[in-house]
Image: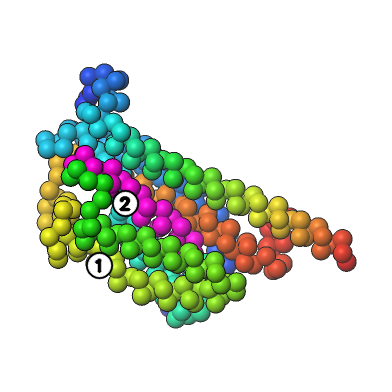
């Protein structure tokens, strides 16, 4: 084990801002990109469904 | 021989690829999650403290995977773009467009994690060093690709224009890779190469490689999930899409 205590772990030997900044930002970007793709998919599908409905009612 | 060709070209149809990608991406996402968990555990609990950089070196476990991903994605994107120009297949342009945003994000992460590493170790967020500057150009190439794509209304014409940009820009990737050899840079040389023994402790190497594979799986899952959106959008007037969204 590399760490003596939980606070020792979070302190990262004095590099807390830099190390947690890197890992945190990467996590935010990856989670954000995944959610964005899912959001785009639900938006697109509801848009396509609306187009289908308006097509069938205009006939 | 002929039957095999037919079999592979089957998946170059956007319709078939849409369903194939839908079956595949959850597996890649699951693999990414597992590898990420193992990689983070090695990064923080197995890999020892570095003799020179203390705990600060642990930035390597996101910086190197993000940086190599930003270069590989560009090569794969340019290869898809080139295939699209050569064979005029619609799916190729869609794959190139699906990869570009993820590549841009990794180039951005590479630069920011590099800055967060540079500040405590070099004393500067940014230097106009060959490695850093060529990576910044890579980010601009991705942004140029995305801007060009969205500025042309006809997606097929946009694909062709973007393919040319992607292929011309690929010259930058070897420049990034070899920049630390060709010029005297502040950035350190490669820690891992195919020709020499890795210049790092074994648990550090395993942590880094696990994170690299996790990022690969993440990228494949993301590109497959995004290309499904692109296919639905571009094929919206076909009967199969109407059936698929019903």
Q: Residues within 10 Å of mark 2 (few under 14, many from 20)?
A: many
Task: State the image coordinates of residue B216 (x, y, percent, origin top left).
Answer: 37, 52
Q: What segment is highlighted magenta in the picture?
A: B95-121
On what subunit does the disc labeled 2 rest? B
Q: How is the image coloured?
A: rainbow
Is residue B60 in view?
A: no
First along the sequence among labels 2 and 1:
2
Residue in the image at 44% along x and 45% along y: A30
Residue in the image at 21% along x and 33% along y: B55
Whether residue A54 is situated above or below residue B41 in the rendered picture? below
Q: Secondary structure at mark 2?
A: helix
- Dot 2 and dot 1 residues touching (CB under 8 Å): no
Residue B98 on the magenta span: yes
Using the image, tell me which numbered label, if any, was put on residue B111.
Answer: 2
Q: Quadrant of the N terminus of chain B?
A: bottom left
Q: Quadrant of residue B10?
A: bottom right
Whether residue B103 is situated above or below residue A33 in the rendered picture? below
Q: Could you say which is closer to the camera, residue B94 or residue B221?
A: B94
Task: State the image coordinates of residue B43 (x, y, percent, origin top left).
Answer: 27, 36
Q: Quadrant of residue A54?
A: bottom right
Identify the residue under disc 1: B174
């Amino acid at each position: 084990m590399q760490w003596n205590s939980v606070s020792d772990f979070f302190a990262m030997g004095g590099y807390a801002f830099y190390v947690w900044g890197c890992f945190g930002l990467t996590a935010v970007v990856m989670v954000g990109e995944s959610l964005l793709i899912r959001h785009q998919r639900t938006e697109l599908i509801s848009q396509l469904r609306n187009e289908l409905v308006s097509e069938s009612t205009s006939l | 021989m002929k039957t095999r060709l037919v079999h592979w070209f089957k998946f170059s149809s956007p319709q078939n690829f849409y369903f194939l990608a839908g079956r595949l991406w959850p597996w890649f996402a699951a693999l990414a999650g597992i590898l990420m968990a193992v990689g983070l555990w090695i990064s923080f609990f197995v890999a020892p403290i570095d003799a020179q950089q203390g705990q600060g070196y642990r930035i390597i476990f996101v910086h190197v995977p993000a940086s190599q991903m930003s270069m590989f994605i560009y090569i794969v994107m340019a290869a898809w773009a080139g295939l699209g120009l050569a064979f005029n297949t619609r799916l190729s342009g869609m794959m190139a467009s699906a990869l570009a945003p993820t590549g841009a994000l990794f180039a951005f992460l590479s630069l920011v994690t590099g800055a967060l590493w540079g500040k405590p170790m070099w004393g500067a967020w940014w230097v106009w060093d060959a490695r850093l500057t060529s990576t910044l150009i890579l980010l601009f190439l991705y942004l140029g690709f995305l801007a060009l794509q969205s500025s042309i209304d006809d997606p097929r014409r946009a694909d062709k224009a973007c393919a040319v940009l992607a292929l011309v820009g690929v010259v930058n990737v070897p420049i990034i890779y070899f920049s630390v050899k060709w010029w005297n840079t502040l950035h350190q040389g490669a820690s891992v190469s195919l020709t020499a023994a890795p210049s790092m402790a074994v648990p550090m190497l395993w942590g880094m490689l696990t994170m690299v594979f996790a990022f690969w799986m993440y990228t494949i899952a993301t590109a497959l999930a995004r290309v499904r959106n692109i296919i639905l959008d571009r094929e919206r007037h076909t009967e199969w899409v109407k059936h698929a969204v019903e």
